[in-house]
Image (spheres, rainbow, N blue to C red):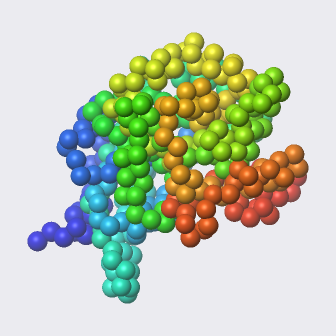
Amino acid sequence: MLTEATIILLFINLSISDVILTKPEDIHSKDLPEHIVLGMMIINIRKEPTISSKFKADIDMMMESILSWSSGTPLHFIVITDGRSVREAEKVLRDTISKCVSLGVIRKRRTKRKFRIPKVKMTFVDIKDITDGNEEFINAMKSNTDKGILSSKYNEKYFHDLFYLGPVYHNKFINLEKFIFLDVDLIFQTDIKKLENQFSKFDLPGGSCIGAGPDLSPHYLHKLKEYRKENPGTVFGDPGRFQGFNTGVTLYHLECLRNNAVYNEYLQPDKVSSLIRKFKFKITLGDQDWFTLLGFEDPSLFHPLGCEYNAQTSMQYLTIKEYKEVFHKYNYCVMPHEMMVQHRNGCGPKVENCQKPEGEEK
């Protein structure tokens, strides 16, 4: 008799030669109706010999946290990658899941806490199959990206196509109803089913198709300086509903987006440029900036996700004198034990982690 653990082990013992790339349109919600669908990116964008050890460690920690808090709901991971990266991406995930299964069995024996290993499905999608047909939108985004960020080699990544794909997933994954897209630097402190349940709170008839939490810093207060100077009294950039989004955890109701004519109109290249011109700053964080500006322009398109589902640890803006006094108004979320998902972005969780010697990259 096959147990859940045996099913997982059968998956992780697949030969690397068995990895195939699936067309996004060939992934159907109806084929795995009980699965929570999760998206992630694993691409070696710097074309180094292997994926960095830090990136692998991040994936390892996130996957272990997801699986260790699982109540047994099946999971379907959709991994966006490329031909160069897919084999290593599969190996990294296979090794991580194998370790988690072993640890899970040990933990189950040693503790009284209920632990159920979920069934896991992995599907790999070539990024080219998502960019194809969306070149005009991607190019419009790139043409509105601040080229000044290229002064740091660490920011070159923000000109890679993968940072501009979030807004167009719905017109490629045409047979998926919804999915949750995750950065890899997350640590779950609750069953991911609770995050999935947030979809039930969307006002779908009202057009709320995307769930995103706040950026827990005065980043957009900083970016909106010129706009706020010309529009005194605006709430955009103030702490609260309009402090901007962080898209490290994003819920996409893809069917809702496909049926939303208002949203799809904003994908036109001229609309992209006019939206960015209106708020008077160039993109520096890929589609996160675009989603934030769209959230200012038409809040009805978004469901505000509680900050506890994307509790960022970056202290970068606390080191900037101009924002030191207001930082707490943006950053406070919930007590540590109430965090559902910790997002280890930027420098932190202590301010000392952001105070590096002059000339060293933060």
Answer yes or no: is residue 73 visible.
Answer: yes
Is 205 in front, or is 1?
Answer: 205
**192 in relation to 107, above or below:** above
Q: How many marks?
A: 0
Residue 168 on image: x %, y %:
44, 28
Furthest residue in direction left, as rendered = 1
Answer yes or no: is residue 23 visible.
Answer: no
What residue is shown at x 57% (from left), y 12% (from top)? 270
**32 in relation to 10, above or below:** above
Residue 187 on image: x %, y %:
52, 62
What residue is shown at x 34% (from left), y 70% (from top)? 101
**247 in relation to 96, above or below:** above
Q: Examine the image and state in which quarter residue 296 appears.
A: top right
For the N terminus, give its image quadrant.
bottom left
Is 195 in front, or is 182?
Answer: 195
Furthest residue in direction top, as rendered = 270
What residue is shown at x 29% (from left), y 65% (from top)? 72
Q: Examine the image and state in which quarter residue 278 appears.
A: top right
Residue 167 on image: x %, y %:
48, 30
Furthest residue in direction bottom, as rendered = 110
**112 in relation to 16, above or below:** below
| Direction from residue 234 to residue 181 in the image, left or right | left
| Direction from residue 320 to residue 103 in the image, left or right | left
